[in-house]
Image: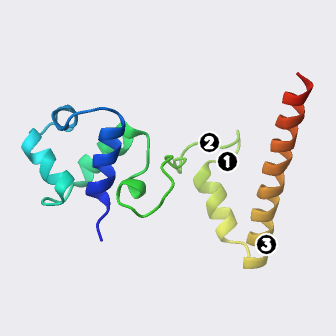
Amino acid sequence: MNKCPEVIRCLREDRGLHQKDIAKLIETTQQQYSKYETGETEISTRVLIVLADFYGTSTDYLLGRTNRSEGMVGANEMITNRYSAGEIMSDISLLSPERRSTVVDFILFLKSCEQIEEKEKKDGE
């Protein structure tokens, strides 16, 4: 089932926008945009990207392929001064399944350490 029409309608309504507002953004008519929200017409890739950028989400979220509304880090975005997100993912994918699992466990450990540090910082204020 195509969830895109429902998702784009909810995002628009949550922001108190009208169909004509989004139609102007994507350079079409209100009538054409309405067809996107009802599922009568498939959304082009260009429009999908414009909407994802406008709402600050990913195209996968708009398409209903993920429940995470936050946009993903771009593959070319530098995560550290030495590695881009794409390079890190590529390196991880070359590891054995056991080592990939270890990487995930380590990331979860680091995240929990940061949460503890943030809590201690708040408690100390």
Q: Residue furthest top?
A: 125
Q: Do the residues under discs 1 and 2 have CB atoms within 8 angstroms?
A: yes
Amino acid tagged 2: Met
Quadrant in the picture for the C terminus: top right
Q: Which residue, given by chain and number where applicable, does mark 3 sit on?
A: 99
Q: How many residues crowd around disc 3 within 10 Å: few (fewer than 14), some, or many (20 or more)? A: few
Name the N-terminal-most of marks 2 and 3.
2
- Whether tag 2 and tag 3 are in contact, CB under 8 A, the answer is no
Q: Secondary structure at mark 2?
A: loop
Disc 2 from disc 3: Cα separation: 23 Å
Q: Secondary structure at mark 1?
A: loop
Check disc 1 and report the residue beneath it.
83
Q: Secondary structure at mark 3?
A: helix
The Cα–Cα distance between marks 3 and 1, rounded to whole angstroms, is: 19 Å
Question: In the rendered structure, are the residues bearing label 3 and label 1 in contact, judged by CB atoms less than 8 Å apart?
Answer: no
Q: Residue at x 18, y 60 (%)?
A: 39
Instruction: Name above or below for residue 99 compared with residue 108.
Output: below
**95 horizontally vs 29: left or right:** right
**Which residue type carries mark 1?**
Tyr
Residue marked by disc 2: 78
Rate crowding at label 2 as few (under 14), some (14 to 19) or many (20 or more) other CA atoms within 10 Å: some
